[in-house]
Amino acid sequence: LDGLADGSRYEQPIERLIAAENAMIAGTDEVITLSLADRPAAVQAVDALETRADALDVEVSELAAALTADRTRQLAAADRVERSDAVRLVAAVMVAALLGAAVSIRTTRSILRRLRAVGEAAQRVGAGDLAARAQVAGRDEIGALARSFNDTAERLGETMGRLTAEVRREKLS
């Protein structure tokens, strides 16, 4: 019981129980001394000690019940806080997931738009439009791909121009 005397509303009842316990111990010492001198008085003293012990037992039970009820209330409050925290955590995870998905979708669309521009330029070059170029800027991998494609298309156009010129010269000669 000493450990429960912490300045709470239980401090006074606990102090009373400790005092009653100490009185019981002192009474036990008196009964032992009395039993050597006056046996009938010792039996009466034992009966009185048993009555005080029964009353003390009732007080301890009531205090234990009150402590248990308080603990139950505190645990319920802690459960409510824990559930509330869990709900907040789930909500935060969902918001983070939605934000992640939104950023991912936006990034994917940006990448696909730039890749489509390179693909469309490649289709135009494949269809014979050697002046077609990919209009993609940037210093990332897609920008490097577009620059490489444009360089290749430029060299292809130059090569085709030279071949066309050579064919014309051969026809004229």
Image (cartoon, rainbow, N blue to C red):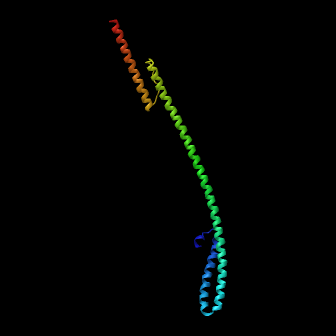
Q: Looking at the picture, how far across and down is residue 37, in whole percent?
A: 61, 93
Seen at 59% across and 46% down, the residue is 91
* Residue 135 visible at all: no
Measuring from the top left, give residue 122's x and y in whole percent. 45, 23
- Is 165 situated above or below 24? above
Q: At 60% across and 50% down in the image, what residue appears?
A: 87
Above or below for 59 versus 149: below
Q: In this view, does 151 lie above or below 166?
A: below
Residue 76: x %, y % from top left: 63, 59
Q: Which residue occupies the extreme bottom position in the image?
A: 37
Task: Look at the image and tell me whether residue 102 can be seen.
Answer: yes
Q: Residue at x 67, y 81 (%)?
A: 51
Residue 148 in the figure: left or right of residue 92: left
Q: Choose between 148 and 39: the one closer to the eye.
A: 39
Q: In this view, does 169 lie to the left or right of 124?
A: left
Q: In this view, does 72 lie to the left or right of 152?
A: right
Assign the N terminus to one quadrant of the image. bottom right
Quadrant of the snapshot with the C terminus = top left
